[in-house]
Image (tube, rainbow, N blue to C red):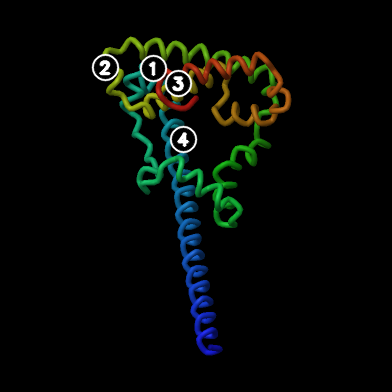
Amino acid sequence: VAGVLLYILREEHSADVSAEARGKKKANEEVAQVAQILNEILKAQATTKAQISALTQDLLSKKLDFEFNTVYKRITPPEDPLQRHRVSNEDFDVLLNKHRLNPEVKKALETLTGSASISSARTKDTVTDKRVIEVHVFMCEELDKIVQLFNKMPNKESYDPKVVMLAAQTMVGAKVEEKFRLKPDDVEHAVIRHHTTLSIDQEFATVNRKIQALSSLLGAAPV
C-alpha cells in the first residue's frame, strides 16, 4: 500500500511540474508576442509620422496642391501589426493587461507611450495654454471644412478610413504650421506641459469634443 501511495504522489508531482512548465512556456510566448507587436506598432507610427511630415512640408512649399484627393493619393496605408498577427484589439488588451508588469513588455510600453513626455522639455516655452486652445479651435475649424468636403464626395464609401484620417491630419497640421509656426510635436508637447490647466478648462474640453465628433464622421480616431 505504501508503495502504491508513493507512486501516486510521484505521478501527481510530475503532473504538477509538467503543468507549471507548460504555463511558463505559454506565458513566455505571450510576452514575446506582446513585445513584438508593441515594437511593430512603434515602428509603424514612426513611419507614418515621417510620411506625414514630408507631405506637410510639400504642402507648405507648394510642391503639393492643397487638395484632399491629392494628399489622400500620396499616403501609403499604415500597416496594422494586430491584423498581421491575427490578434483582435480585445485579445491584445487582455494580453497587455496580463503581462504589463513584465520588464520586456513594460519597456516596450514606455517607449511607445513615453516618447512625448520625455520630449516635452523641448517644447517652445512661448506656447501658452491660451495659445494651445487657440490652435485647437483653429484645428477644429479646418477639420470641419474637410469633413464637409468629404461628405459631398459621391464615392466616399470607397475611401480607406485610416488614410482619410491621415490625409485630414496632414492638411490640418500644415494649416496650423502655416498660421502658428508650430509643428504637431510642438502642439502635443505644449498640451502635456499645460495639462493641469487645460484639464479644467471648459473651452478646451468643448473644442476637443468637437474634434472627436468630427473625426468620427471620417470613420477613424481623432486627429
Residue 142 vertical placement versus 36 (above, below): above
Under tag 3, what secondary structure? helix
Percent across and percent down for residue 14 are: 50, 77
Mark 4 or mark 1, which is nearer to you? 4
Q: Which mark is residue 216?
A: 3
The residue identified by callout 2 is 155
* Mark toward the start of the polypeptide (1 vs 3): 1
Give the secondary structure at mark 4.
helix
Camera-near label (4 vs 2) is: 2
Amino acid, disc 1: Phe
Of the two numbered discs 4 and 2 on the same chain, state the one appearing first in sequence: 4
Q: CA distance from mark 1 to mark 3?
A: 22 Å
**Residue behind mark 1:** 66
At 52% from the left edge and 73% from the top edge, which residue is drawn? 17
Q: Amino acid at mark 4?
A: Lys
Which numbered tag is attached to residue 49? 4
Residue lying at 32% horizontally and 21% vertically, measured from the top left = 70
User: Mark 3 or mark 2: which comes first in sequence?
Assistant: 2
Instruction: Count residues near mark 1 (Cα–Cα under 10 Å), then give few for <14, some for 14-19, many for 20+.
Output: some
Q: Assign a secondary structure to mark 1.
A: loop
How crowded pointer 3 is (Cα within 10 Å; few <14, some 14-19, many 20+) is rated as some
Relative to 4, residue 145 above or below: above
Task: Measure the alpha-carbon separation of dots 1 and 2.
Answer: 20 Å
Tag in front: 1 or 2: 2
Q: Residue at 46% of width from left, 61% of height from top?
A: 26
Amino acid type shown at disc 3: Ser
Contact (Cβ within 8 Å) of mark 4 with mark 2: no
The Cα atoms of the two marked residues, 4 and 3, are separated by 21 Å
